[in-house]
Amino acid sequence: MKSTIKKWGVRVLGDPREKLLKKMPRNAVCAEIGVWKGDFTQQILDIAAPRELHLIDPWAYQTDFGDRLFGGLVAQSQQDMDAIFQGVQQRFGHRSEVHYHREFSDKAALLFADLHFDWIYIDGNHYYEFVLADLRNFFSKVKLGGYLAGDDLKWTSPELHGDLPVLRAVRDFINEQASAKLVSTYGGQFIIQKDR
């Protein structure tokens, strides 16, 4: 791995997501994968002030993930997910820089040309194969010198028996992608830069 593993466990005071957003370029073209109700979307708009913000989320009720917010833990039906999506639209409908892509991220990746984004924040499905797919599918969509960032490096779930799938996916992606450089981790957040 190109970066020291010592960085992975650093404790950060304050809001790690806010710290991450302050490192992202302002007036940028960016995306958020995994939006839910738009709370982090609001932080992106307030702190990073993007020129374009693409919200990517299927807002789909998924019973295969019954212990997740979108599979039964909070949302109990597709109608609940539709209502959450409508709430996001109402919340940001007045913002011309916000664009909605109600798609699974693998399908949404096909909507964008390579080198389209200055940065992308990944916070979708946290299981290994989904995180790795998001990293792989969106890396070509980031400009040279741009960033893939994300959340929940230390996330796990009881059925995973201590496995940290987000951390493992990020490590594996960096090891397989020669032009991906881990530049920062803190408070569960990660920032990968696409080498110039």
Image (cartoon, rainbow, N blue to C red):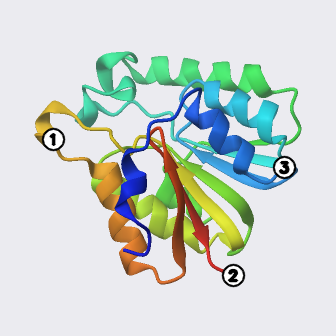
Q: How crowded is mark 3: few (under 14 residues within 10 Å), some or many (20 or more)?
A: some
Image quarter in which the N terminus is found: bottom left
Where 161 sits versus 166, above or below?
above
Mark 3–mark 1 Cα distance, whole angstroms, equals 37 Å
Residue assigned mark 1? 162
* Local secondary structure at mark 2: loop
Q: Earlier in the sequence, mark 3 or mark 2?
A: 3
**Residue 175 in the image: x percent, y percent?**
37, 76
Image quarter in which the C terminus is found: bottom right
- Left or right: 144, with 12 as reference point: right
Circles 3, 1 touching at the beta carbon (< 8 Å): no
* Local secondary structure at mark 3: loop
- Left or right: 168, with 24 as reference point: left
Where 79 sits versus 160, above or below?
above
Q: How crowded is mark 1: few (under 14 residues within 10 Å), some or many (20 or more)?
A: few
Residue 190 appearing in the image:
no
- Left or right: 126, with 158 as reference point: right
Image point (44%, 69%), residue name: 3
Image point (56%, 53%), residue name: 149
Q: Residues within 10 Å of mark 2 (few under 14, many from 20)?
A: few
Q: Earlier in the sequence, mark 2 or mark 1?
A: 1
Circles 2, 1 touching at the beta carbon (< 8 Å): no
Task: Name the kind of residue labelled 3 in the image.
Answer: Arg
Residue 36 appearing in the image:
yes
Residue assigned mark 3? 26
Task: Name the kind of residue labelled 2 in the image.
Answer: Arg
Mark 3–mark 2 Cα distance, whole angstroms, equals 19 Å
Q: What mark, if any, has residue 196 been given in the picture?
A: 2
Which quadrant holds residue 78?
A: top left
Where 112 sits versus 44, above or below?
below
